[in-house]
Image (cartoon, grey):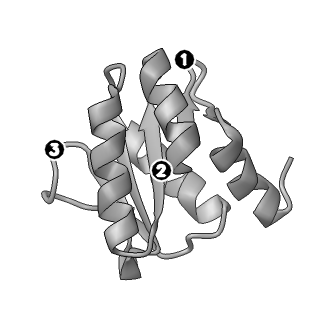
Amino acid sequence: MEAEELAVEWLRWVGFRDARRLADATPEGIAGTDVRAVAAFNPLPLEPSDLAALSRWATRHGAAAISFAFAGWTTDAYELAERLDVALVRFTFAGNVEASNAASRNLVAARGGA
């Protein structure tokens, strides 16, 4: 399963039942229909500017901002995500999806998951 498909499944699992991969809208990206959530996937470590742009777009549309990554986030990006309430979700080499900060753990808790 591709990373984007795993991300869509995780979004559905936490309650964004209408989540789908955007075919050609972005090179690597997913979002929920009705724009309840906007999510971005990047295989490289994300910088603060990436998360700031994601947060701005989500805020403008009243949506949750979620960042999926393999390589994680720079320290500055992680700290910014905490301030902006951007959920950070990491893919492991074993193919698991892990909530990586308070915002993403809150999404899991809201669905009643562990």
**Residue found 66% across the figure and 36% down from its top:** 101
Left or right, residue 114 beside residue 21 = right
Q: Residue under label 3, please give it.
A: 27
Regarding mark 1 in the picture, which secondary structure is present there? loop
CA gap between label 2 and label 3 equals: 17 Å
Q: Is residue 34 above or below residue 46?
A: below
The x and y percentages for residue 26 are: 16, 51
Q: Is residue 82 above or below residue 48?
A: below
Amino acid type at image mark 3: Pro
Of residues 75 and 30, the one nearer the viewer is: 75
Q: Name the front one of labels 2 and 3.
A: 2
Amino acid type at image mark 2: Ile
Q: Residue under label 1, please give it.
A: 93
Callout 2 crowding tier (Cα within 10 Å): few <14, some 14–19, many ≥20: many
CA gap between label 3 and label 1 equals: 22 Å
Q: Residue under label 2, please give it.
A: 66
